[in-house]
Structure formats: C-alpha cells, structure tokens
Amino acid sequence: MLRRAPLLLVLAACTLTSQQASRSGIHPEDMDPTCKPCTDFWRYVNGGWLDKNPIPSHLASWGTFPVLSEANQERTRTILDAAVSDTSAKPGSNKRKMGDLYASCMNTAAIDQRGISPLQPDFDRIAAISSTKDLTAALAVFQKSARPFGAVNGVVVGPFRLTSGQDPKDPSRIIARIVERDGAGRTGSAIFSLPDRDYYLKTDPKSLETRAAFTDHVARLLQLAGTPAIDAQTQAKTILDFETALAASVMSIAEKRDPEKIYHLMDLAGLRALAPAFDWAQFLREQGLPESTPVNVTEPELLKKVNEQLTAAPLATWKTWLHWRALQIAAPYLAKPVSDEDFHFQRTVLAGVTQPPPRWQTCASIVDRDLSDVLGQAWVEKYFPPEAKRRMIQLVENLRAALRDNLEHSDWMQPATRQSAIRKLDALQIQIGYPDRWRDYSALPIGPNTYYENVRAAWAHGQRYEIARIGKPVDHLDWGMTPPTVNAYSSTADMKVVFPAGILQPPFFDMQADDAANYGAIGAVIGHEIGHQFDDGGSKFDATGALKNWWTPEDRQQFETRTACVVDEFNTLDVGGGLHHNGKQVLGEALGDLGGLAIAWKAYQRTLAGKPAPPAMDGFTADQRFFISFARVWGTQQRAEAERLQLNTNNHPIARYRAIATLQNMPEFHRAFQCKPGDPMVRPLAKQCKLW
C-alpha cells in the first residue's frame, strides 16, 4: 500500500533544492525488476506494488488515486466523528449540519424502518398526473430538487436537466443551460438510467447482456417498492423502450467534445419551436426565471424527441418512467433491500464491485458531496496550512514559464497565433487548495434523523444556488471539486486551473523528495491541467474564455494534424479482450498527458541550469526518477467491468495507457532508459506524437 503520510507543504521555491532532499521520492520495492522498462514501463514501475495489493472488494480500482482518496476519507472521518459528538455546536450552525447529515446517514436502523415511505410524496405527485399539462408541471417541480453538477454528475427526474453556466460566447455572464450530461468526462448521464446513450444502442453481446440485466434490475426494484411482479416485468420493458427512444437523439461523448456542437443559444420562442408540446413559460416561472432568460440547449435533437414523446407516448408510459426514475435516484438513500439492489446493478453488474464500502465511507462521501464547502473548510483548516498555496503557485509558475518558452519558440505557429496563445497562457488563473469563498448554507435545513429528506434538501439548496446565478456576472470563485478531492481540473470558460488540497501530498508531491520526483509527478499533473486550455476543445476558447477562433487557418490545420496522431494512437491500442479506446473521446485527456509531461520535463530541466548534475539515488539517475515518478502516478489496476465502463463512458484513458502511450512518444524517456527502435515502449519515429 502507498504511504499515507500527513499532508505535506508544497514547494518552498521554484525548486526543492533550498534544502537537501533526503530521499529519491521513488520506491524500488514497489517495482517489478523482472519486467524490462522498454517493454512495459507501467508494469516495471508498479508491478511489485500491484501484485501485493489486490483490489479491495468494495472498490472498482486500486492504486495511487484511490489509496490517497481513502487516506483523505480517514481524515474526513475524524472531522465528522467530532462534529457528531460535539454537543456545544449550535443548532443551525455549519458544524451541527455536518454532524447531523453524517449521523442521519449512519443511522441505518432508522432508514430501514422507514422503508420507501420517504418517496411517497413523489409517487403521489406522479400518480396524480392526468394530462400533458399536469406532466409538464410535474417535470418543472422535479427540476427544483435535481442533484446539482459538481464532484459527481447531476441527476434529475425528467428527460432533460436545467442548470446554469457561462455563456461560451460571452463568458462574462451566466446563462441557463439544458443538458443531458455535464460534459466533464464523468461516468453517468443526468437523465438516463444506464451510464450512456450507447448502452441502449449497441448490439454486441455484452451490451445485450447488460440491457437484460438492467430490465431484471428494474423489475426487482419496482417490486421492492410495491409493484406486483407481473406488472413490474412489463413496466421494465416499457422503461427500457422509452429511454432507448430518447437515447437515439443524443450525441455521443466524442461528438460533445466539440464545443461548437453543444452551443445553441435560444430564447423562449426557440424553445417553443423545438418542443411546442412543452409549457416552457410555466417551466421557467417554476424555476424562478423570467421568460426572457437566454438558454443554451446543448442537445436540440433531444428536445425534439421529448416533444415527440409528449405527443406520441401514452401518459401511462410517462408516469411509469417517472415513477421508476424517482425510485432509482432515491434508492441509495432508502432501506437496505432497496439500496442493496441498487448497489448490485450499479456497482456489481456495471463495475464489478462485489461488496459495498464501509458505511462510514459512504456517509463521509455524502457529506463531502452535499455539504462540500462546510466539510471543505473544516478539512483545510486541519490538514492544509495557508502557506501551501503560495508554495504551490511558485511551482505552477515554473510550469507556465516552460510552456511560454515552448510557445515563443514554436516552429509551426505563425506570429499571430503564437501571440494569442501566450496571451491566453498569461491570463490563466491558478487556484490552489480551496476556494477563496465558502458557500452559505444558512438556508439549508438538516435534521439528525431524516436522511433522505436531508439529501433532497441539500440538492434543492444546490439547485437554487445554480439557478440564482443566471443573469449574474461571473466571479470565477466557485469550484467544481471539493477540497479533499484527489484530482485537479481546468476550466476553459473560467480561464482557471484548480488544484484541491487533497492531491497535494505523496506520491504526487513529497517535500522530502528531490526535484526529479516532484516534477515527474505533480509537475506532470500541473502541466496536464494547463495543457487542457490548449487541447482539442480548450483551444477553441480565447484568453477571455470566449468560444472564439484565435488561430490562423494554416496553424489550425497543423494543430489538427498533430492531434490526429494521438487519436490514431489510442484507436489502435489493444487494451485486451478486443477492446479499444475511442481516440476522439479521450483526445483531450491524452493531449493533457502528452503535453503536460513534456512541459514538466522542460520545467525540471530549467531548475538544473547552471548546477551540477543531480546524484543518482536508489540506483537511478535523476532523469530516470522523473519518469518513474510519472508512471507511478498511474499505478492503478481496475476490474474488467470497470475498464469496460470507463472505455464506454469516460473521457479519460485507462490508467495503464496514460503512462504507456504518453511515454511511447517521449524521446527523453527513451534516452533515459536506453530504449531502442522496435522496443514496445518506443512508438515508430514517423508515428511519434508531439503537440508543442
């Protein structure tokens, strides 16, 4: 298992050599010396650890990210246990709400005693629908308690999701958005019961098997909620057919990577033209929005299909589907038989996980998701000292300087494009550790014994927050990840990159390790996120965050040629079982890895200028340790079902190939380990990909 060290401070300067590094930052005992580095570098670096650390039964994957995430959850547990037992916390205070939400989740006896009764108001609302007008009114009400987008995908009882976001062509303002999913590469749709539209449309044996398992699951869950067995089977088929009809109108994940394809700004008249059977004026009023609200409809064909279903599908079909969706979305928060059935399909069938996590982990995740800023504030106060922000920013600026140098000396960019790229790089904001403003939860009611109602109240509170932003100026202070998260992200509209406190610790950053290890690990992560501003999608946004072309036609063609190399590489990688990545689907993340590692390497080399060559440590040169640290970041193994799920639904390549495919294109890596043409870790020279 990777070390679960306390959160360590980040860079004291642009390099770590202001004090003597005491260790190499790598762990030879975790490596597999029987595997040659030029054959499978991922296995060479991580094989020993992976062999000794099988995937726990409650997880779909195990390695660098999940190990650190579990360590962070242990820290979270300490905070939550203290909040529950603190009798001095005032009613209505953030600490009391945090403790009550956690306690209500942990009180499984009370949850089981209530059965499915918390859902009865939703069931009654659906049962009362007797006309299309009633139906659209119910859909408007359900939007108000949809789960907001954030650390996880949003969900809603309804055929589309209303949220808010920056206007891609005028990023100074927040507008309304109607979407099927949030587009951030997360597994799952806001409106479908299966993870993605392709699960309904593919005809290969595995897809047919999954749909059969899904209908059995629907029938079982309906029966647990009181539907007779014979009716449950019929309703399950109705539900699958209904969602399949919607799915046929939705774009693929790869298609949605093009920001132009998901931008369709319209007014009320435009909405009515797409779906005249839906009462849009009533819908906007129910959300508290004026009829003049501009809306970006990311999937116009979906709304056309919704309109068709409003006129063609029997009202009984709509009611059956809504009843099911209300049940499915609520299932994880209800009595054990219901939540167990939900777990079986969502985690065992789809992801291969055989055992639920410990209850405290489930509950800690709920608090992190639904009271993110309350927990986040307590977390960083305990585990992330203020000076860490300053130190991390210094490292980021070294990476920024390295990319600026690449752009200034690019041999394929014309001056106009080069200047625009540098202007965008200079405008990029860096946000470290935690947001500069915490959200206000004073209007959110949380009780100690009403778990489901607490969750719904938190969702409604989050949805109100999202909708209240519409029409307001952008302030760039909201985050899409929580502070304890082991991850980072880049926002092209917000023109910022975010590094939560949760990732700023070993093995991503180790204050006691030398520069080589840190630049290979956290440096590559920083380069990856900065690089997203210039990937296939990010490169279509300018220095203000506007969806606006800043390329000359010739330079854009050069860029497309370079990115096509990466698409081809991932299309042709065999990940086993006859499966492959969709190169266009994972292009942005693959470009982030390739460009990010190249920038990190250059930034590391800048730290060595004018200094003696760093000494070898643990039998490896500094250059070798740089690449070992990079591959160690991706030392994660997955269950076969989880890999298939990721390939089908996620913008990120499989962890193993984030190391292998990236390094196959790096001559600096080949030199460090003396890899030769023809070795598996060396992509043929004519096919080696390079962005900058």
Image (cartoon, grey):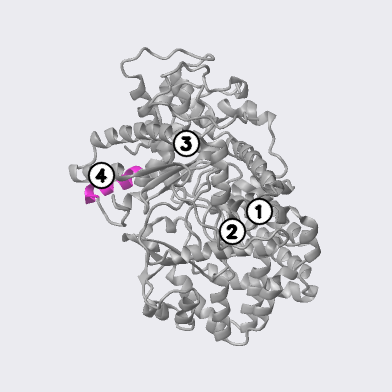
The dominant secondary structure in magenta is helix
Secondary structure found at label 1: loop
Quickly name the residue at label 3: 386
Secondary structure found at label 4: helix
Tell me whether the residue at label 4 lies in contact with that at label 1, contact meaning CB atoms closer than 8 angstroms. Answer: no
Quickly name the residue at label 4: 423
Front position among marks 4 and 1 = 4
Q: Is residue 557 magenta?
A: yes
Quickly name the residue at label 2: 195
Q: Residue at x 54, y 35 (%)?
A: 634
Q: Amino acid at mark 2?
A: Pro
Tell me whether the residue at label 1 lies in contact with that at label 2, contact meaning CB atoms closer than 8 angstroms. Answer: yes
Quickly name the residue at label 1: 350
Looking at the rendering, which quadrant does residue 145 occupy?
A: bottom right
Q: Amino acid at mark 1?
A: Leu
Q: Which residues are magenta?
A: 551-562
Secondary structure found at label 3: loop
| First-in-chain label (4 vs 3) | 3
- Foreground of the two, 381 or 631: 381
- Foreground of the two, 353 or 292: 292
Q: Is residue 196 above or below residue 6?
A: below
Q: Is residue 390 above or below residue 376?
A: above
Determine the CA span between mark 2 and mark 4.
39 Å
Q: Is residue 35 above or below residue 203?
A: above
